[in-house]
Image: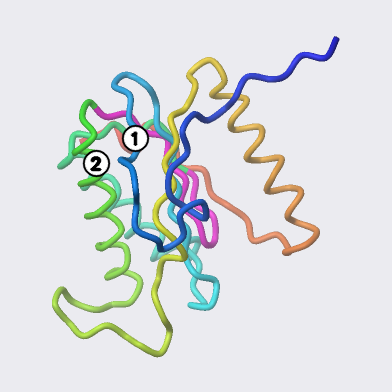
Amino acid sequence: MKTTAPAVFESPFGGSLLGKAHARSKRPFRKGRGLHITLSANPRRGLSFLEPKLRRRLMVILRRQARLHELKIQGARLGSLEIHLEARATKRERVSGFLRASSGLIGRAVSGREKGARPLKSKGTLWKCRPLTAILNLRSRWEASARLLERQLQNQGALGFSGSVAVPAAFFSSA
C-alpha cells in the first residue's frame, strides 16, 4: 500500500494561481502557523536580486517592514528573480500590510524612482503576479525546503542555474 506524503502547503493564494485577476476570497491565514511568501519578478526587467548592492537594500527593506508590521521572519531565500520568506504573524492585516508596503518599496528600490513619480512604461511592471502565500505545515517544514530545492534543481537544466542566497533567520531577529 502506497502512502502519500503530507501536504507541505495548505490553501495557496495568489501567484500564478491568480495572476493579475481580482481576488475573490481573502488571503488564507491561521494564527500560530507559519506562512510561506513568494514574490516573483518579471524576467524581462533584466534585474537580479542577487546583486550585492540590491540584495543589501532588499534585506534592509524586508527587515524594517517586518518590524513595523510585527511580522516575524524565520527564514528567507533570495533567488535571481524570486524572494521566498517563511514568516509568522498574529493578524491577517499585518501580513497584507507587510506585503503591500514591502512590494512597493522593493519596486522603488529596483527602479530608483521616488514615491509619486511617473512609472517607467518601457520596461513594464516589476512583479510577475500577486505575492503567493500559503500556510505552512510545521511538521513538514524541512520537507518544504527539500521540495523547493528539488524543484530548483530540476529547473536548472531547462532554465540555466541562476543561483540563490540563503539569509540566516538571525538577520531578522536583531533589531
Q: Residues within 10 Å of mark 2 (few under 14, many from 20)?
A: many
**Which part of the image, by quadrant, shows the N terminus?**
top right
Residue 125 horizontal/vertical position (percent): 39, 75
Task: Tell me residue 44's x, y (percent).
Answer: 53, 78
* Of the image marks 1 and 2, the number of the one nearer the N terminus: 2
Q: Residues within 10 Å of mark 1 (few under 14, many from 20)?
A: many
**In the rendered structure, does residue 132 fall within the stretch colored magenta?**
no
The residue at 71%/40% (across/down) is: 150
Mark linked to residue 73: 1
| Local SS, label 1 | strand
Disc 2 target residue: 66
Q: Position of residue 118 (x, y in %)?
A: 21, 85
- Start-end of magenta stretch: 77-89
Cα distance, mark 1 to mark 2?
7 Å
| 35 and 30: which is toward the camera | 30
Residue 59 locus on image (x, y percent): 34, 51
| Residue lying at 35% horizontally and 88% vertically, measured from the top left | 121
